[in-house]
């Protein structure tokens, strides 16, 4: 088949499978019910609720922002892997306005900042000169107004990039415009750069500032890797599920799955490397100000059950997916690749909880950082609303972009036309 014989579309908007339509309805219902249950938790124990809300927000916001970054990278680099998962990434990052709405209660609810961040009540730490000095130095940057203002601005910037990338992608569906494609590529480059600047501020605000005197120079890049892994796992799961349906089954090839598997492998290695590097630097310094982040997570002489969670993360987030993704035959089948991506996504939830739960200003002993029922209800509630809008947006455009002539390998025979790409 020559290039002139190949077609770039048009790919029609196919009806969503009945199971997806059912999931969309159930996700909305579950989201509303579990958010109401979470509000009951707010009335009974506000500290537990705020911690749970922060955990849910960091996970779903990370998935949303990470999806935007992957779509921009795919426009910059080209390749069939970016075409087959582009619409799933676009549907995810268009939830950025929703996450901005979820941010507002976190910042504006009564006593929420006081419950979550030590800088919001520095007088409680006046008895400790070292902590008091740190909080005094942070006082200008960390105020409720500054905290809300800069994070709203950051989300608005990302929303602006999301709208441009989405509208340009939909416009390309109607006409093959090389000039527009080039403009999207040039627009995506500063977008990726700004993302890393924004995510550094985001990580300092929502993760690092929950500690009174702990510092990490790689917290921004580590958070970016975490968001990228979450987003890629979700996109891979979506690709594997819709691989049996048109139009994706007409274009998907084993090589695309192999590329997506390699990206998951790279993210797994990077996540492990960055976490180990952070741990080694802090542990070798062995100062009481720095090691608290890890001792509260069960890695010191005052062990807690969080230490077992760290072992679970090491096995489930690194060793298992690392070994499985080294096997080429597993990456080239939708069934096995979906299971690996599902494992990584599950471990991403555990890792997000491991980062959030043991931190905070109200710890009094090394065994603090318990799990509360609101952790589950807030995560499901926010995720149910997120999933509803995600699936609704998927149904509004073809699952494969039209006129993808900058990625010619997407136009060859599909994975399910002569290739054994599914188990």
Image (tube, rainbow, N blue to C red):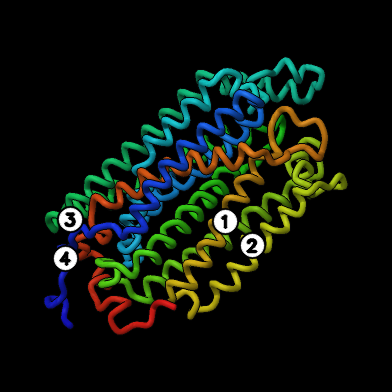
Q: Is residue 253 visible?
A: yes
Q: Helix, strand or loop at disc 2?
A: helix
| Residue named by callout 1 | 346
Left or right of 256, for residue 343: right
Residue 236 position in % (x across, y down): 43, 62
| Real-space CA distance between mark 4 and mark 3, rounded to the nearest whole angstrom | 9 Å
Q: Residues within 10 Å of mark 1 (few under 14, many from 20)?
A: some
User: Label 1 near label 3: C-beta < 8 Å?
Assistant: no
| Real-space CA distance between mark 2 and mark 1, rounded to the nearest whole angstrom | 9 Å
Q: Helix, strand or loop at disc 4?
A: loop
| Real-space CA distance between mark 4 and mark 1, rounded to the nearest whole angstrom | 35 Å
Q: Residues within 10 Å of mark 4 (few under 14, many from 20)?
A: some
Please name the residue shown 50% across and 53% down the image: 230
Q: Between 26 and 398, which is closer to the camera in this rendering?
A: 26
| Residue named by callout 3 | 173
Residue 287 position in % (x across, y down): 81, 40
Please name the residue shown 55% across and 75% down the image: 326
State which tag comes first along the sequence, 2 or 4. 4
Left or right of 342, for residue 243: left
Residue mark closest to the camera, 4 vs 1: 1
State which tag comes first along the sequence, 2 or 1. 2
| Residue named by callout 2 | 316
Specify the label residue 9 is tagged with.
4
The total number of labels drawn is 4
Q: Residues within 10 Å of mark 2 (few under 14, many from 20)?
A: some
Residue 387 position in % (x across, y down): 41, 46
């Amino acid at each position: 088949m020559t290039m002139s014989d190949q077609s770039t579309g048009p790919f029609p908007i196919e009806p969503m499978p009945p199971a997806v339509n059912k999931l969309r309805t159930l996700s909305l219902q579950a989201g509303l019910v579990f958010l109401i249950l979470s509000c009951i938790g707010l009335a009974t124990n506000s500290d537990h609720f705020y911690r749970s809300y922060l955990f849910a927000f960091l996970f779903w916001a990370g998935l949303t922002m990470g999806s935007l970054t992957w779509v921009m990278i795919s426009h910059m680099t080209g390749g069939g892997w970016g075409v087959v998962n582009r619409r799933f990434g676009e549907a995810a990052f268009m939830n950025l306005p929703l996450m901005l709405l979820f941010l507002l209660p976190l910042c504006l609810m009564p006593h929420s900042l006081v419950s979550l961040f030590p800088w919001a009540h520095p007088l409680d730490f006046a008895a400790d000169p070292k902590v008091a000095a740190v909080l005094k130095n942070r006082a200008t940057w960390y105020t409720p107004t500054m905290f809300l203002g800069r994070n709203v601005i950051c989300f608005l910037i990302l929303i602006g990039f999301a709208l441009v990338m989405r509208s340009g992608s939909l416009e390309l569906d109607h006409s093959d415009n090389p000039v527009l494609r080039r403009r999207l590529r040039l627009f995506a480059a500063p977008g990726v750069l700004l993302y890393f600047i924004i995510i550094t501020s985001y990580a300092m605000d929502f993760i690092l500032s929950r500690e009174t005197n702990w510092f990490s120079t790689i917290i921004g890049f580590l958070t970016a890797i975490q968001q990228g892994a979450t987003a890629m796992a979700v996109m891979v799961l979506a690709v594997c599920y819709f691989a049996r349906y048109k139009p994706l089954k007409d274009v998907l090839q084993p090589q695309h799955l192999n590329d997506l598997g390699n990206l998951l492998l790279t993210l797994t290695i990077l996540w492990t490397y960055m976490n180990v590097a952070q741990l080694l630097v802090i542990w070798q310094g062995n100062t009481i100000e720095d090691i608290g982040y890890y001792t509260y997570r069960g890695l010191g002489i005052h062990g807690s059950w969080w230490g077992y969670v760290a072992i679970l993360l090491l096995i489930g987030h690194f060793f298992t997916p690392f070994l499985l993704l080294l096997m080429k035959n597993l990456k080239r089948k939708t069934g096995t690749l979906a299971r690996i991506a599902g494992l990584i996504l599950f471990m991403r939830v555990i890792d997000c909880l491991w980062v959030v739960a043991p931190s905070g200003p109200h710890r009094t002993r090394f065994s603090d950082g318990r799990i509360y029922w609101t952790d589950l209800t807030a995560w499901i509630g926010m995720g149910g609303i997120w999933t509803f809008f995600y699936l609704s947006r998927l149904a509004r455009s073809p699952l494969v972009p039209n006129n993808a002539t900058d990625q010619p390998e997407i136009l060859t025979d599909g994975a399910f036309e002569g290739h054994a790409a599914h188990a």
